[in-house]
Image (spheres, rainbow, N blue to C red):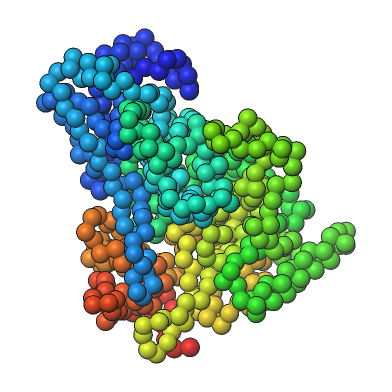
C-alpha cells in the first residue's frame, strides 16, 4: 500500500503488523474481487491512473483475477418506439508487468512519481445526475453497495470518483449530496482524465464494480438490489441522515406502533406528481378535506368517550420543489471555483436537508410513480407508503388497452422497514377517486396504530402485478434470465422493462413484438402461463 505523508490522515489506523506488510507491498497493485463474472466488485490496493486509464502495476508471473467490472449504465440511442436502451458500462484496468519488484519500484520512484490519493475511493458511473432520483439510486447507491462487500469501509468516510454525464446543469445539487454522503468529497473523472495526460496518480484503496445494484437492475425477487439481503436500504438511509447531521430525526422501531403517542394524529402527505390529472387533483383535495375534518372534529371534542372509527390523521399536499431551506444564515458564503467544498460545508443547511427533515416526519407517504417514489427509502421505520400509480396505454396493439402502472414497486419491496399499499389495480383505470383514497389512508393509519411487525416480508410490499412477475420468474426460466442477467450482448430491450408492460403484453412483450425500423423486437415470454396468472390475481386485461 502506498504510504501517505501522514500515516494517520483520513482515519487510517495502522498496527505494527500491518505496517510491516504495507511497507513490503507498498508499490505493487493487489486486487481482491467478489461476485460472479458480470456482477463482481473489486478492491484494489495501489491502483494507478495515467492517460485517462486505470493501470495495474504488477510483477510478471503474479496471479491477477478477472478484472472486467460493471460500473453503471449509460443510455443508448432511443429506439423509434420510445424505448431507451440501457447499455452496460464496463471498466477493465490496463496491466503493466515488470520483471521484478525492484524494476517496479524503480519505475514508480523515478518515472511515475505519482500523486497519492489516500484513504478509500469508490469509482462509479453517474447517469442523469440532473435528476435526484437517478443520481441517488443509479449512481450513489450502487457505488455505496460496492463498499459493503469490504467492511468496515462502508461505515467510514470515503471519496467518490464519478464518471459523470457531460451535461451542464447549474441547478443540480446531486453533487453536493454525493459529496456529503461520501465524507471525503467527490472527484469528477473528467477532471482526473485531463490532469492524467501528463501525470500519474495512485489510489491507496479503490473499490469499483457495482454488479447488478442499480435501481433498474431487475431482480428475480423484484426488490431493489441489495436492499434486503445486504441491509442496503437501511444503511443508505441512515448514512444519508448522519452525513447531513440529521441522524437523530430518524425513528427506529421494531414495530410500527412503537414510540408513538396514540393521542396524536398521524401525518400523511400527498406528494405532487405530474401524472395527476386535473380530475385526480380535485379528488385528492376532496379526500384531504374529509379526512382532516374528521380529525379536527375529534380534537375539538377530545373529552368524548365514544370509540373512534379510525385513527386520527392530518393530511397535507406538498411539492418537493417547494420544500426549501428556512435558515438563510450562511447564504453569504459562496462556492469557490477552486474548492468544491465551502468553509461552511458542515453547517450550511440545504434544500435536500429540508426534504429529509420532512421525510423523517412523514407517517403516510402518498404519491405516484417517478422521482417522488424514490424518496420512500428515507422514511422512518414503521411508515406506510401508498403508490397511487398512473395510467398507461398500449400504443402498438389493437384494441387499445389502458392499465395501471406502479413502476417503482421494487423500491418498496426492497425497503423492509416500511409497509407498501397500492391503489386498487383494476379501479385505477377509472382515474383516482376520493372514496378509494380515504379508504387507503384509513387502512394505512390502522396498520400503523395496530402495529405491524418489522421487517416486513418483501412480497407483502408488492402489488398484484408484482406477484405475477415473481411467479413468472420462478416458472419461466428463459424469461427470468433475459430480464435479470445484464451480461454483454444481451438484448437490452428485454431487461429494460416495467412489470406492468409485461403483464399486459405491451411492446416487446406482445406475442408479435413490435417493429423498430427494420427489426422486430420480441422478448421470450410464456403467454399461456402469463394469462393464467392474470386470472389468478384477478387483473383485468382488455379494452377500455
Q: Which picture quadrant has residue 3?
A: top left
Relative to 487, say whether 184 is above or below.
above
Question: Is residue 350 something that shows in the picture?
Answer: yes
Q: Is residue 530 above or below residue 483?
A: below
Residue 490 occupies quadrant? bottom left
| Front-most of residues 291 and 310 | 291
**Number of on-image labels:** 0
The x and y percentages for residue 214 are: 39, 52
Q: What is the quadrant of residue 282 in the picture?
A: bottom right
One can see residue 456 in this view: no
**324 in relation to 341, above or below:** below
Give percent across and percent down for residue 94: 22, 36
Q: Quadrant of the N terminus?
A: top left
Does 266 sit left or right of 525 as displayed?
right
Rendered residue at 75%/56% (across/down) = 265
Q: Looking at the picture, tell me which residue is in the foreground, 536 or 185.
A: 185
Task: Determine the residue located farthest toward the front in the rendered image.
Answer: 198
- The location of residue 263, given as percent across then percent down, is 77, 53
Q: Is residue 267 left or right of residue 300?
A: left
User: Horizontally, is 34 left or right of 465 in the view?
Assistant: left
Name the residue located 26 percent from the left edge and 16 percent from the top edge: 110
Nearest to the observer: residue 278 or residue 253:
278
Picture residue at 40% right of the left edge, 58% below the top: 216
Q: Is residue 315 above or below residue 227?
A: below
Residue at coordinates 23% horizontally, 55% vertically from top-left? 488
Q: x, y percentage for residue 370?
A: 52, 63
Amino acid at each position: 500500500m502506498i504510504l501517505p505523508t501522514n500515516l494517520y490522515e483520513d482515519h487510517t489506523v495502522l498496527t505494527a503488523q500491518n505496517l510491516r506488510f504495507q511497507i513490503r507491498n507498498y508499490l505493487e497493485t493487489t486486487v481482491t474481487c467478489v461476485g460472479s463474472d458480470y456482477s463482481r466488485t473489486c478492491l484494489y490496493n495501489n491502483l494507478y491512473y495515467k492517460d485517462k486509464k486505470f493501470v495495474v502495476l504488477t510483477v510478471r508471473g503474479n496471479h491477477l483475477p478477472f478484472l472486467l467490472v460493471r460500473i453503471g449504465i449509460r443510455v443508448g440511442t432511443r429506439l423509434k418506439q420510445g424505448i431507451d436502451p440501457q447499455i452496460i458500462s464496463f471498466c477493465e484496468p490496463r496491466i503493466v508487468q515488470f520483471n521484478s519488484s525492484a524494476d517496479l519500484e524503480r519505475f514508480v520512484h523515478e518515472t511515475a512519481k505519482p500523486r497519492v490519493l489516500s484513504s478509500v475511493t469508490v469509482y462509479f458511473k453517474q447517469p442523469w445526475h440532473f435528476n435526484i432520483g437517478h443520481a441517488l439510486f443509479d449512481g450513489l447507491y450502487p457505488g455505496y453497495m460496492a463498499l459493503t462487500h469490504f467492511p468496515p469501509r462502508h461505515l467510514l468516510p470515503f471519496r467518490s470518483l464519478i464518471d459523470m454525464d457531460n451535461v451542464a446543469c447549474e441547478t443540480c445539487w446531486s453533487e453536493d449530496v454525493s459529496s456529503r454522503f461520501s465524507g471525503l468529497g467527490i472527484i469528477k473523472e473528467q477532471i482526473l482524465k485531463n490532469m492524467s495526460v501528463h501525470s500519474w496518480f495512485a489510489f491507496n484503496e479503490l473499490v469499483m464494480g457495482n454488479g447488478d445494484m442499480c435501481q433498474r437492475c431487475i431482480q428475480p425477487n423484484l426488490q431493489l438490489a441489495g436492499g434486503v439481503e445486504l441491509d442496503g436500504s437501511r444503511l443508505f438511509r441512515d448514512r444519508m441522515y448522519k452525513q447531513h447531521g440529521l441522524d437523530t430525526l430518524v425513528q427506529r422501531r421494531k414495530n410500527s406502533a412503537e414510540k408513538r403517542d396514540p393521542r396524536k394524529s398521524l401525518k400523511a402527505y400527498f406528494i405532487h406528481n405530474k401524472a395527476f390529472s386535473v380530475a385526480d387533483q380535485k379528488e385528492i383535495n376532496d379526500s384531504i378535506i374529509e379526512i382532516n375534518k374528521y380529525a379536527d372534529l375529534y380534537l375539538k371534542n377530545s373529552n368524548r368517550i365514544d370509540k373512534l372509527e379510525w385513527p386520527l390523521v392530518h393530511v397535507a399536499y406538498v411539492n418537493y420543489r417547494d420544500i426549501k431551506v428556512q435558515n438563510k444564515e450562511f447564504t453569504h458564503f459562496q462556492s469557490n471555483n477552486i474548492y468544491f467544498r465551502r468553509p461552511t460545508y458542515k453547517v450550511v443547511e440545504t434544500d435536500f436537508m429540508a426534504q429529509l427533515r420532512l421525510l423523517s416526519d412523514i407517517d403516510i407517504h402518498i404519491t405516484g410513480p417517478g422521482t417522488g417514489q424514490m424518496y420512500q427509502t428515507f422514511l422512518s421505520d414503521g411508515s406506510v407508503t401508498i403508490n397511487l400509480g398512473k395510467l398507461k396505454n398500449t400504443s402498438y396493439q389493437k384494441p387499445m388497452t389502458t392499465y395501471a402502472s406502479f413502476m417503482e414497486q421494487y423500491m418498496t419491496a426492497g425497503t423492509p422497514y416500511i409497509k407498501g399499499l397500492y391503489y386498487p389495480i383494476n379501479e385505477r383505470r377509472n382515474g383516482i377517486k376520493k372514496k378509494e383514497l380515504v379508504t387507503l389512508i384509513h387502512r394505512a393509519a390502522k396498520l400503523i396504530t395496530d402495529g405491524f411487525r418489522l421487517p416486513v416480508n418483501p412480497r407483502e410490499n408488492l402489488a398484484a402485478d408484482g406477484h405475477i412477475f415473481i411467479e413468472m420468474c420462478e416458472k419461466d426460466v428463459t424469461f427470468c434470465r433475459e430480464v435479470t442477467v445484464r451480461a454483454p450482448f444481451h438484448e437490452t430491450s428485454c431487461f429494460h422493462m416495467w412489470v406492468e408492460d409485461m403483464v399486459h403484453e405491451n411492446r416487446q412483450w406482445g406475442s408479435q413484438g413490435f417493429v423498430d425500423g427494420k427489426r422486430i423486437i420480441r422478448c421470450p415470454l410464456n403467454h399461456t402461463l402469463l394469462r393464467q396468472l392474470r386470472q389468478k390475481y384477478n387483473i383485468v386485461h382488455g379494452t377500455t
